[in-house]
Image (tube, grey):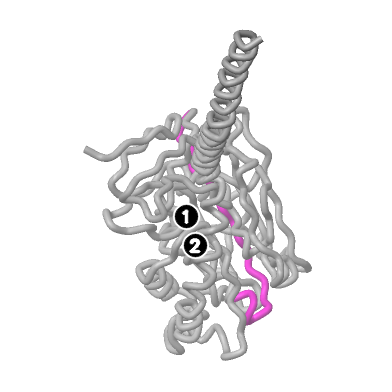
Amino acid sequence: MEIWYDKRQIFSEREVLLVVGRNQNGPKDKRLFAMLVLAGLILFLWVGNRMAEERLAEPVEVAKEVSRTSSIYQEILEDHQLASESSRVRQADEGNKNDQASSSIEDSSGNGASSSSESESSGDSASESQQGAPSLEEAEDLGQLYHQNPPSVPGGQAYVEVNDNVPIFSDADLTDVEEAWERYSPLDDLGRVSEANALLGADLMPAESEQREALTAITPTGWQQNRYDIVSAGWLYNRSHLIGFQLTGQQDNLLNLMTGTRYFNVEGMLPFENYVAAYVEDSENHVRYRITPLFMGDELLARGIFMEAYSIEDDGELQFHVYIPNVQPGIEIDYSDGSNQLAV
């Protein structure tokens, strides 16, 4: 009996040791499992953040732009006698605006309304321009003359004037002014955008509460996105509106979006768009407006755009005709497909 008791006792002790060992290993296993789950979650979040970075970039930059540039544009509008203290300036950018872009408005708008004496001179020449507006056939010939090849743009300039800064609207273009409208050309066989036209008016502009949306659902031709430290906000390309959001409220209209560099969008187009928007808001006049993208041959990325504007009720108090090249300083771009690299 004693031997049997001793064996049972020994067995029981071993069993106890095994149970105790399992109890001691249990918390370690749970901690290890929890650490693995946590590591996996962190990796998942990191990858998701990287994938979402580009998608979130545009709306974040728009929010920053609204808060940073309102005072700059108010000063510009006051300098041009286009706004009173109560005038509202609508901001709708796809990137960060700076003082250099602001000064480009002042330089370009000398043909519009930069000072009282210049306004009178500009108004006189504008009246003459409208009275001598070309016929539809003549305007088409002028378009063929000026809009088939990219003008030479000096280094460091975001735009260059075309036809002495006089738009080439036909007589009919300047008489169909009963109400605001917008028209977009269909995509061509390569999926590229074409000419966009509008008669801009206050009733066509988006409501003050309407916000510009992210445009990631649209991929325009030539979209080969890359990030560079030398580019403002990092990303090389923006989904650029032909007719800006602040003018018509258009969001993800594929007929109105092209691939444009950061420099092209912010330094080139934006100053003119905000200038026109402020003028329309303050005067409640109409502006005949046209954007003509320039593609060479079968290239998928536009070389640039021609931008024309002419105010109707005051016979061209506001008018301009400029070419804005689709370039980015320090970056080499292949316009055949939009591929890009740092300039050597």
Snapshot quadrant of residue 48: top right
Are the residues tagged 1 and 2 within 8 Å (C-beta)?
Answer: yes
Is residue 172 among what the camera can see? no
Q: Residues within 10 Å of mark 2 (few under 14, many from 20)?
A: many
Mark identifier at residue 270: 2
Q: Which residue is mark 1?
A: 265
Label 1 SS: helix
In the picture, the quarter occupied by the C terminus is: top left
Snapshot quadrant of residue 179: bottom right
Q: Position of residue 55 (x, y in %)?
A: 56, 46
Q: Position of residue 143 (x, y in %)?
A: 52, 48
What residue sits 66% from the left and 65% below the top? 174
> Relative to 263, is 195 on the left or the right?
right
Q: Nearer the viewer, residue 266 or 3?
A: 3
Mark identifier at residue 113: none
In the picture, the quarter occupied by the N terminus is: top right
Name the kind of residue labelled 1 in the image: Asn
What residue sits 67% from the left and 53% below the top? 251
Picture layout, residue 149 above or below residue 275: above
Upstream in the sequence, badge 1 or badge 2? 1
Name the kind of residue labelled 2 in the image: Leu
Q: Position of residue 312 (x, y in %)?
A: 64, 72
> Relative to 255, is 34 on the left or the right?
left
Picture layout, residue 282 above or below residue 235: below
Is residue 229 among what the camera can see? yes
> Relative to 331, is 245 on the left or the right?
right
Q: Nearer the viewer, residue 126 or 299?
A: 299
Q: Is residue 46 magenta?
A: no
What residue sits 40% from the left and 45% below the top? 150
| Magenta range | 279-297
